[in-house]
Amino acid sequence: MRSSFITWYPYCRRSDAIAAALGGTSRLIHYLSFKRPLQAPLKYVLQAVATLRTLRHEQPELILVAVPPIFAALPAVWYARRHGARIVVDAHTGIFAHTRWRWLMPLTRAVCARVDAVVVTNAHLQRQVATWGVPSVVIGDVPVHFGPGRPPEACDRPRVVVVNTFSVDEPVEAILAAARAVGEAQFFVTGDVRAARAVWLKDRPTNLTFTGFLSEEEYAGLLRAADAVVVLTTYDHTMQRGAYEALALGKPLVTSDWPLLRDTFSRGTVHVRNTPAAIAAGIREALAGRERLGAEMQGLRHERGALFATRLAELLRVAGLQAAPDAAIGELSLANITRR
């Protein structure tokens, strides 16, 4: 079965992993600058043209498309309906939760009414999609495979990696304050600093480094070297991709204390409120118990991997495709991923 996963982002490990599990290709289509709203009209036109060109070249039987932005689905739906392909929308939490996208909910509903299935990250969102009369499948967990990566420079203190993109739901100020309080550790905060506030960069604590955007090799090496991984969100019902990455490597995790995250990351994890004091205490707890928490994460990884295989098979059934995944779960590789 030929499948193509279209994502209008410069990177998306969730799309990469699902595409790899289906034996298909992940097409990351992105032009101009990232997170620059004024460029969106021109950027979306360019990306729509590139999407149609990609689909015409690959002629997939199954098209998956990640939203937001919901506009990414428009050329994919048009192509699918003209060429008889099945189409699935992978609806990230932001399409429902972020103010930037909520005002487009009528368009989102209209688009989803014309696809074969919608993928959501949790049961709360599935209940919302159910009111639209659209078949849906929950795929929260997506197994991740990392290569050996490039080891970072040596660090003489425990290494805390904060997986971050400077999105509106990330409590960056609280993380900076927590880093000041945990002076015995060295913090590495990922994410393209062009999206960061100038005051964060200027007033960072001395034990914190903003890494900037990292290559896949650099990112894998940094996570492998982590003594604890921190991934936080101020939005309820938001699944954390960085938390899956900690799970994949068996790293102790510190994440926000929301019911969804507490249920998904039930072991190997310290759940905290998004306040400086709570984050600092959680990091200290994770570092002190890193061996026990790491072992718990290893066991949890096997359980969640089996769940992913079940949900992926369900997706194919709901979308009207009975074929089994072509790639073995647990042996996913980024080698067949192409970026535009």
Image (tube, grey):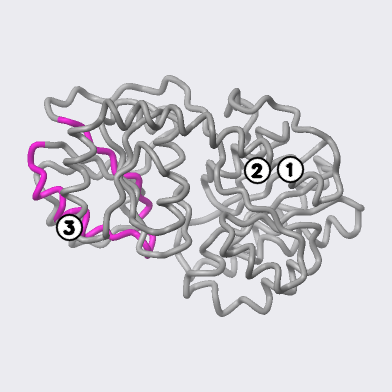
Badge 2 crowding class, 10 Å Cα cut-off, few under 14, some 14 to 19, many 20 or more, is: many
Q: Residue at x 86, y 49 (%)?
A: 320
Q: Is 240 a magenta residue?
A: no
For badge 2, the amino acid type reads Arg
Depth check: give the residue in front, 223 or 194.
223
Give the Cα separation between the discs numbered 3 and 2: 38 Å
**Dot 1, crowdedness within 10 Å: few (<14), some or many (≥20)?**
many
Labelled disc at residue 4: 1
- C-alpha distance separating marks 1 and 2: 7 Å
Residue beneath label 2, please? 27
- When the figure is inspected, residue 230 is found, relative to residue 109, above or below; the finding is above
Q: Earlier in the sequence, mark 1 or mark 2?
A: 1
Q: Amino acid at mark 1?
A: Ser
Label ID, residue 276: 3
**Residue at the extreme top:** 148
Task: Tell me the residue at 28%/31% (across/down).
Answer: 226
Where does the magenta region start and end? 158-184
Q: Residue at x 81, y 58 (%)?
A: 116
In the image, residue 106 sits, relative to residue 320, either above or below, namely: below
Locate the N terminus by quadrant. Answer: top right
